[in-house]
Image (cartoon, rainbow, N blue to C red):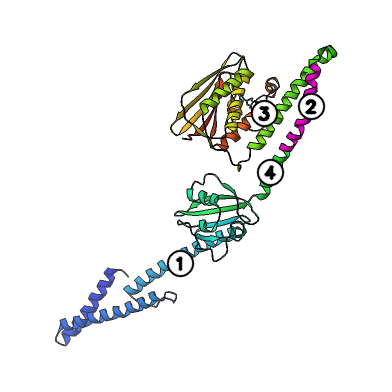
Amino acid sequence: MNWIETAGRVAVVAGIGALVGGVYGSATAGGLVALTGVIVYWLYQMRRVQRWLESPDKAPPDIYGVWGTLLSHIYSNQRSSREIQQRLQSNVEYLQNSFASMRDGVVMVNAHGAIKWFNKAVEPLLGLRFPQDVGQTLTNLVRSPQFNQYFIKGDFSRPLQYTSQAENPLHLQVEITHFGEGERLLFVRDVSAAVRTEQIRRDFVANVSHELRTPLTVISGYLATLKSSREDCPPRFEKPLDQMLQQAARMENLLKDLLWLSRIESEAREVKRELLDVRGLLQELKEELAGAHPEAKIELSLNTSAKILGDYREIYSAIANLATNAIKYSPPDSPVLINWSSQGKHCRLSVADKGIGIEASHIPRLTERFYRVDDSRNTATGGTGLGLAIVKHVAAAHDARLEVESAPGAGSTFTLVFPQGD
Ligand code: ADP
């Protein structure tokens, strides 16, 4: 019933009251009595609506007229909002049930860092206890400075891997995503088995390389002795001897690179952080390269005296690999330019050559171990296929990135972009 109908009915009741009042001598009094009756009736209905609103679980009372219409609107709104709430609740329960059945640990944290919910799987991983830890601040309960730093910093673009400080330490991987209003969802995974396998693989490579070095040194030694005593050696052995010496030298380089790579490839290792004078390092490297490759034209361009934080040997080996490649993959008389400059908060070390260059399709794979653009190229240059893998690991350990620009026939520029150290 709308308000015009309601007003019409009130007017009719007042009119009847006035008529009856007129019969008894006062139409006004009759009208007023009728209106008072309407108000009393409305007050009564209002009270019924109010009582129902106070206990909405009960069925709504049967009310006629304007209050009945209002009541039915309230009732249907209430029902639909209850349905929405139930649907949301069942969605949340569905999600929680799926998270609860996951083998990975899941924790929901609110905008203030307090735990809202977590599944059973996370309890042994983060040492949480249900239900007493719900509502607690997560960083007060997880006793790992690495985890807390990562959580508070709020940069979750890459997952965190760390070793828990429990009695039996676990290797955990944590991924965090934002959801809702400042809330965070954490996925915690035990990656101890994968880390162990990786460690076994690394140890195996390191041990094999180490064990092979001694016999190889003996073989190279005898080959060198044989070659130096030419008069005792039949001429037909000369070429095979040269090739054996060349291949032995290649194997020695390969073992040296493998050993070095297995030392530096662990992402979790502590890297020495000393302030490095890159200008001095490059001058030393230039002298060494000039000794090893007298035909090469190496030019240094030192445009900054900025320093970086890092390990001298590692940085030296990375730049040496880039420079050796530039020499290897360029004609002998072509220049190699090593440039050291700073740009904003970054320092750039680039090694540019005008050599054979690389096709764009190979560039993303260059830092893979043993990846070569052209295998026949490698036999001629004597490379190990590990040089750029070493550069990649050194860069990662120094928060640096490697950029490669190259075009076949035009040359290549490999740039290491470091954060400035001072
Ligand atoms: P390698 O010991 O074979 O040089 P690297 O890991 O150092 O191994 O390099 C991987 C491959 O990338 C090389 O085999 C070569 O094909 C290519 N490459 C690296 N540097 C250059 C460069 N400056 N110019 C052209 N090709 C290059």
- Label 3 element class: loop
- Residue carrying label 3: 385
The answer to whether 382 appears left or right of 216 in the picture is: left
The answer to whether 73 appears left or right of 331 in the picture is: left
Which region is colored magenta? 206-227
- Residue carrying label 1: 82
The answer for how far apart the CA atoms under marks 4 and 1 are is: 55 Å
Q: Give the crowd class for mark 2: few <14, some 14-19, many >=20 residues within 10 Å.
A: few
Q: Give the crowd class for mark 4: few <14, some 14-19, many >=20 residues within 10 Å.
A: some
Is residue 117 rendered magenta in the image?
A: no
Image quarter for ligand 1: top right
Asked where in the image residue 373 lies, by quadrant, the reply is top right
The answer for how far apart the CA atoms under marks 3 and 2 are is: 24 Å
Q: Count the labels in the image.
A: 4
Q: Are marks 2 and 1 in contact (CB under 8 Å)?
A: no
- Residue carrying label 4: 199
Q: Give above or below for 309 relative to 11.
A: above
The answer for how far apart the CA atoms under marks 2 and 1 are is: 84 Å
